[in-house]
Image (cartoon, rainbow, N blue to C red):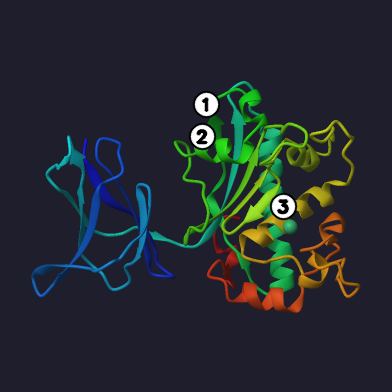
Amino acid sequence: MASAGIVARNERSGWCEVTASIDGVAPWELRLERLRGGQWITVRNPFTWSGQRASFRCSGIARARIRARATSAGSPARPVTAEIRQPKPIVPQVRMVYARPRDRPARDDFAAAIGNAGREIQRWYAGQVGRSFRLSPRGVERCVLPQDAEHYAVRTLTRVIQDLQPCREVGFSSPAYVWLVYVDVDHACNRREPLGVGAKGLAILPRDDLDGLVGVLGTNDCGEPLTGAVGRWVGGAAHELGHAFGLPHPRACDRGRPTCDYAALMWAGYVSFPGTHLRTQERERLSRSPFFTRAWASFGR
Ligand SMILES: [Zn+2]
């Protein structure tokens, strides 16, 4: 079934996101048109395009439509069209996900601990920045991955993100969402692509961190015992979320200089969470982020 349509609108930043597919395949051509003076006019180069998803500036576009075309046996099929009617407003927010492979049991204590950690980190950032992020009113969202845990022991990051897609559109750099994802998988010792990372728009953490949040520690990927109070594990998520909001490590620390602020959250301070801090320039940067607002407590409590 051919389809194309606006799925989201980020009211604050004025971005729209569109997904389109034709018989499940990314379209060969996608065109945005807007209504002006009773005529449909093509918007030139509106998209940042990746696979079946695209983003474009849509503030001020009340009505627009998408034309998507697919190739069929080498020749274009008939274009399909979908109108933007009333785009659904999305307030930039942090979404929390608890994912488990199909062979691992659902753990309500893990889901509850993720929600508690999210709220604690939210309050902590508010104390540091004077604003904080909103948490999604959906609370902790749950996903079941289609393979057994063993499948995710290698190429963990790639496989987990890929297999999450049918459940939630977890990814990088969404204008609407920063994702905080916990996955109940273990990673093979010293292999590439472990979890426990944060990058623009996504913080993703493994089973070790779930155990840490509930205070029952096991061993790391290489069989060594894990340590740390619950705060250290909440702090780990706060650090990775910092990366997800665009914060790097303090430069002096990355360069091994003696001026390194070791106690900063974005360096080693996360182990002492909540007894750590954001640095001045980090607070300034976050206060300008569309994800940070003084009204952070207004939904998703
Ligand atoms: Zn880091």
Residue indicated by mark 1: 146
Left or right: 201 in relation to 183: left
User: In the rendered structure, which amino acid carries the disc numbered 1?
Assistant: Pro
Decide which of tag 3 and tag 1 comes sooner along the chain. 1
**In front: label 3 or label 1:** 1
Q: Quadrant of the N terminus?
A: top left
User: In the rendered structure, which amino acid carries the disc numbered 2?
Assistant: Asp
Q: Is residue 120 above or below residue 167?
A: below
Q: Position of residue 186 (x, y in %)?
A: 72, 32
Residue depicted at x 51% and y 34%: 163
| Residue 275: image tag | none
| Residue 163: image tag | 2
**In front: label 2 or label 3:** 2
User: In the rendered structure, which amino acid carries the disc numbered 3?
Assistant: Ala
* Alpha carbon separation for disc pair 1 and 2: 7 Å
Q: Position of residue 220 (x, y in %)?
A: 82, 36
Picture quadrant of residue 297: bottom right
Residue indicated by mark 3: 237
Q: Residues within 10 Å of mark 1 (few under 14, many from 20)?
A: some
Picture quadrant of residue 49: bottom left
Left or right: 45 in relation to 165: left
